[in-house]
Image: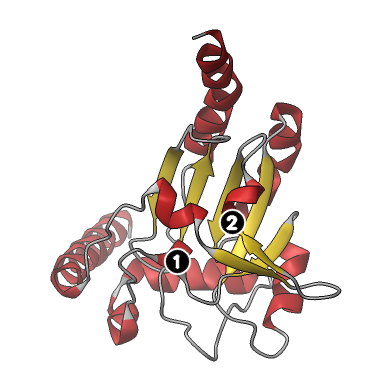
């Protein structure tokens, strides 16, 4: 039985690798965002009276971690709070009860990015190719098991990402773009980038 299990496992891994390679050919490559592109993004509040503002105000003073359609980084909020780095999420649309369903899984403020600039500057989507990737099924099952259904209406096929931004003109410390749905950023990389913010800020002030 052990031998059969290993053979089946190897076959599944091989099939997954082939499908990933084939689908990757048809996926649009990500284009890195510039600080100016993100700064000029107009965001809208989703609680209370709706107000619009420029995204740069979120990280202007102390830096921020901003996630486009991701909730898994909520576990880092205590460490980010100690570093004085804010945690936010942006969503591309407000459909039905999607935002209300999302908030219990995210420990931070959520804003609407109607023009989807945090999903660009080259917007990417998977379309039906998603159903051919084993990783998408695995990530979807993990999210479903944790109780998060995600977006089943609207622009649900667009890929998101994670940004760590330093205050002022310090720039983009880390940019992670999803390769497929549920492609999580390494949380250790996020913490490492966030810890660089105060150190580099002090260095800039001494110049």
> Which residue does the numbered mark 2 point to in the structure image?
55
Quadrant assignment, res 106? bottom right
> Which residue does the numbered mark 1 point to in the structure image?
117
The answer to whether the residues at label 2 and label 1 have Cβ atoms under 8 Å apart is yes
User: Is 189 placed left or right of 43 in the picture?
Assistant: left
Secondary structure found at label 1? helix
Pick whichever, 112 or 53, lies toward us.
53
Pick whichever, 141 or 86, lies toward us.
86
Pick whichever, 188 or 138, lies toward us.
188
Pick whichever, 148 or 86, lies toward us.
86
Residue displayed at 62% across by 40% down: 60
Quadrant assignment, res 53? bottom right
The earlier-in-sequence mark between 2 and 1 is 2
> How many C-alpha atoms fall within 10 Å of the one at disc 1: few (<14), some, or many (≥20)?
many
| The furthest residue to the top | 206
Secondary structure found at label 2? helix
Task: Look at the image and tell me in which quarter the N terminus lies.
Answer: bottom left
Residue displayed at 36% across by 53% down: 33
What x and y, as percent, mark residue 114?
55, 77
User: Is 155 placed left or right of 201 in the picture?
Assistant: left
The answer to whether any part of residue 111 appears in the image is yes
């Amino acid at each position: 039985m052990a031998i059969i299990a290993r053979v089946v496992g190897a076959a599944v891994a091989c099939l997954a690798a082939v499908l990933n390679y084939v689908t990757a050919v048809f996926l649009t490559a990500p284009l890195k965002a510039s600080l100016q592109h993100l700064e000029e993004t107009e965001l809208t509040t989703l609680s209370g009276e709706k107000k619009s503002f420029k995204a740069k105000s979120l990280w202007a003073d102390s830096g921020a971690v901003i996630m486009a359609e991701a909730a898994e980084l909520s576990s880092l909020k205590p460490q980010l709070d100690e570093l004085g780095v804010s945690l936010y999420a942006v969503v591309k649309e407000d459909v039905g009860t999607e935002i209300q369903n999302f908030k219990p899984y995210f420990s931070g403020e959520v804003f609407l990015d109607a023009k989807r600039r945090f999903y660009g500057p080259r917007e990417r989507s998977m379309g039906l190719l998603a159903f051919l990737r084993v990783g998408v099924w695995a990530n979807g099952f993990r999210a479903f098991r944790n109780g998060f259904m995600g977006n089943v209406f609207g622009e649900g096929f667009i890929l998101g990402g994670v940004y760590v931004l330093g205050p002022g003109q310090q720039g983009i410390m880390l940019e992670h773009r999803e390769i497929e749905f549920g492609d999580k950023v390494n949380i250790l990389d996020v913490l490492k980038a966030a810890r660089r913010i105060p150190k580099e800020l002090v260095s800039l002030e001494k110049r």
